[in-house]
Image: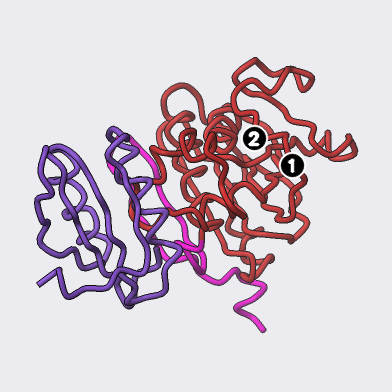
Amino acid sequence: MTQALAPDARIDITAEVCPMTYVRAKLRLETLPPGGVLEIVLQGEEPLKNLPRNFRAEGHEPMPPEPLGEGRFRLCVRKGQGAGQ
Amino acid sequence: MTLTDDQVIRYSRQLLLPGVGGREQGALLEVEVSLEGSGAALADAAAYLVAAGCAVRPAEQQARAPGFLWNPAAGSSPDAAPELNPDAVSQPRTTRACFGEGRFRYDGIGPRVAVGGTSEEGIVVFQAADGCTACFQCSAPESSKLAGPLATWTGTFGALVLLRLLMGQETGGGRLRVSLAPGRREPLTLCPRCAAR
C-alpha cells in the first residue's frame, strides 16, 4: 500500500536516538501542508514502536512500516488535515 | 523562525509534547516576560519561562538595555549572568507578556498571568492578550502569602499557563485554584465594573 505513496519529503533518522528520532521527524513533518506525506527512514525497535504511536496521537496518519533490511524501516506518514503540527 | 540545531536539541523535551512544534517554540523565543510584584512564586515561574526560551525582565529593570536578563537560578541579583539559557538573551524580542504575583499594576500589553494566595491555597488568574484588562486586574489576587512548596507549585503552574497562552493553546481567561490536590479551573467571571456596563 505504501509503495503507491509518493512522499513529499524524506528524512533519515537512522543516526538519531530517542527522543531526537521523533523530534526530527516531527519538525520535518511540520513543514509540509496538511495531507503531505513524509517518508522516514529509521532504525531499531524504539522508533519503530514510538513514532507511529506519537504521530497517531497528534492526528497524523502513519502507514504500515516497510523493512529495508539491516534493521532499517521505511515509514510514511500523512500529515493530518486538522493537525497543527 | 527556524530553530538552530542547538535549539532543537535544547528544547527537544518540550518539542516532544503534543501541540508543541517548531512554530510554537519559535514563538516562545520571541517573548519577553515582564515580572511584576513580588513574592516567592516569581523565581520559580521565571526559571521555567527562561528554560522555555522566554526572556524575563523584572519591572524595575525595564529601562535597562535590551537583552538584560534576571537569572533566578543564580539568586535574586538582577546582574547575575544568564547561565540558565543562553537563548534568553541572544536576540531581540517582539512579543510582550506579563507574569505577576500579588498586587501589581498591569500595563495591558500581551497575555498575562497573576498568581497569589494564602499559605493553604494558591490562585492562578490568566487572560489572553485580547481579554479585558479590567477583568484581569479585578480578578487578580489581592495579595500573596505563598511560601514553600505551594509557592513553587503555584509559580510553576502559572508559568505553564502563560506558556500555553503564548503558544496559542489557551484562549480567553480563567482562574485556577492550586493546592496539594490537582488544580481546578473555574471560569473568569466579569468584574463588577465590566458587569455594570
Q: Which residues are magenta?
A: B168-197
C-beta proximity under 8 Å, tags 1 and 2: yes
Q: Residue lying at the far bottom in this picture: please name it.
A: B197
Residue B1 circle label: none
Q: Chain of mark 1?
A: B
Point 59% across, 19% down: residue = B73
Q: Quadrant of residue B49?
A: top right
Give the residue at x 29% y 72%: A80
Front one among B24 and B22: B22
Q: Which residue is mark 1?
A: B91
Farthest front residue?
A: A69
Q: Residues within 10 Å of mark 1 (few under 14, many from 20)?
A: few
Where is residue B46? Give x, y as percent. Answer: 60, 33
Where is mark 2, residue-wise? Answer: B87
Apparent colour of chain A: purple
Mark 2 residue type: Asp
Q: Quadrant of the N terminus of chain B?
A: bottom right
Residue type indicated by callout 1: Gln
Residue at (77% x, 22% y) in the render: B78
Q: In this image, A49 relative to A61: left or right?
A: left
Residue B195 in the magenta stretch? The answer is yes
Label 1 secondary element: loop
Q: Position of residue B9 (x, y in %)?
A: 46, 34
Identified at 25% across, 49% down, the residue is: A41
Q: Is residue B72 magenta?
A: no
Going by the image, does B37 lie left or right of A37?
A: right
Apparent colour of chain B: red
- Alpha carbons under labels 1 and 2: distance apart: 7 Å
Q: Are marks 1 and 2 on the same chain?
A: yes
Q: Is residue A62 above or below residue B3?
A: below
Disc 2: which chain? B
